[in-house]
Amino acid sequence: MDTALFNTLLAWADDQLVLGHRLSEWTGKAHVLEEELALANMGLDLIGQARNLYQYAADVEDAGRDEDKLAYLRTEREYRNLLLVERPNTDFAHTMLRQFYYAAFMQRYWAELTHSGDTRIAAIAAKATTEMQYHRRHSAEWVVRLGDGTDESADRMATAVDALHRYTGELFECNADLQALVDAGITAHPERIRAAWETDVAAIFARASLALPESEPYMQRGGRDGLHTESLGFLLAEMQYLQRSFPGQTW
Amino acid sequence: MAVEHFDRRARERDAWAVAAAVPDPEVPCVTVADLGILRAVEVTEAGDVIATVTPTYSGCPATAMIEAMVLSALRTAGYNASVKTLLSPAWTTDWISAEGREKLRAYGIAPPEQSAAPANELFAQLRVPCPRCGCADTEEISAFGSTPCKAQYRCRACLEPFDYFKCHRQFA
């Protein structure tokens, strides 16, 4: 088995699934119907991308696990998602800022992956990059509306920036598995996205009248090593509840 | 088992017609062929039919349903059939036929505006003609609608709210 490929596909799939799940937590709780739909639709896009990646990972592993076993039967230390996507929804400002940070990165990263030497990854990427483009626009518009809004919305946005910016460093990490794929022409080094991402974030923050944090002396990390914040435990407990209660059950 | 003599070309044509007639479960005014979801129908040497479909959006919940419906239609028509899914080349709204676009419009869904969409620009309003009255004085209510592929619009002239089938293609 190509371990580097399997581990990386799993990490990417975990990113999409955890963020998709976070968005699904808004179901029935959004402030306006249009946002209720937007959050659910974005969550659906992400879960669809997760499924494509899990299916590929399962094929690469070739050990009898399918997408469901990978999603529902692994625990916290086995999940490899970025810490950013597991951060709690908190409020709409946090949710939109988290989405913007992630979509501004992922839309560009998926665009790089459309040139992958692996045709299956390139195919998954071709769909995902377009979908993330819509996510980026939607979330950036909200960052601007809220940042450049009322005193309360600006306050909440500033609080969200304080809470979340320190999780963005992990977007650009490249561990040994990812480096192996870079060397094999399967993926691009995430550093390639940094300049464009930073410019995008700075421009949106300026429009939103938000102060861009000084470069963080310490960025939170550990997700790719399975070292998560306590939030992931609660998320998986909810997401995996049915499988944990009725092991092996199927539709 | 006796080998049946059959006209491969004719069977391909007929099987295609059966698969192509399957309506989209969510937007039943168009077929899977109109939307460019049905990519090919081949007949093997043994006479088995293999239909190839491609998913639209990554998370489209209708994908599994469409595969099942195409399979069911072919089997009901008497073929020994299977359906395979092709991810690449990626589906794009460019593959919606002209007929499909007209059917969408008649149904009340504005078809995708294929000219350069303001993909990255914030707050840009894409001009989408109202499917009911044709007026271009419309506005987007939400980029996300009843399904991932559609956005919600409103016509300022006739006041009709309508779905817009979003342009899905790799933007530059």
Image: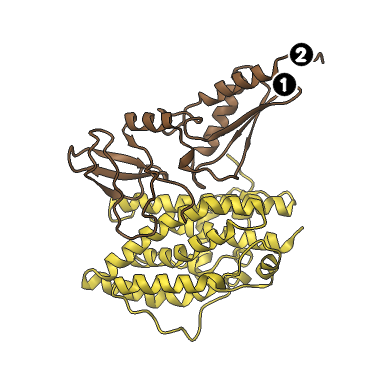
Chain colours: A yellow, B brown
As shown in the figure, which amino acid type bears the numbered disc 2?
Answer: Glu
Protein chain holding label 1:
B
Is the residue marked by circle 2 packed among few (<14), some (14-19), or many (20+) residues within 10 Å? few
Query: Badge 2 sits on which subunit?
Result: B
Residue B53 in the image: x percent, y percent? 58, 35
Labels 2 and 1: the sequence-earlier one = 2
Picture disc at residue B11: none
Give the residue displayed 41% in from the left and 84% down from the top.
A214
Determine whether B66 is above or below B122 in the image: above
Please indicate whether residue A188 sits to the left or right of residue A231 in the image.
right
Q: Is B13 on the left-hand or right-hand side of A229?
A: right
Position in image of residue B2 (x %, y %): 81, 13
Most foreground residue, A28 or B34 = B34
Residue drawn at (37%, 59%) of the image:
A137
Q: Are marks 2 and 1 in contact (CB under 8 Å)?
A: yes
Look at the picture and state if A227 lies above or below A57: below
Q: Residue furthest bottom?
A: A217
In which quadrant will I find the N terminus of chain B? Answer: top right
Discs 2, 1: same chain: yes
Residue A240 appears at what percent x and percent y?
Answer: 55, 54
Could you say where residue A170 lies in the image, as x and y percent from the top left? Answer: 54, 73
Residue on which disc 1 sits: B47
Other-residue count near label 1 (Cα within 10 Å), few / some / many at <14 / 14–19 / ≥20:
some
Indicate left or right for B143 with B158 as reference.
Answer: right
Residue drawn at x 75%, y 60% is: A2
Q: Nearer the viewer, residue B79 or A95?
A: B79
The local secondary structure at tag 1 comes to loop
Residue A28 visible in rendering: no
Q: Report whether residue A114 is seen.
A: yes
Kind of residue sitting beneath label 1:
Gly
Residue topped by disc 2: B4
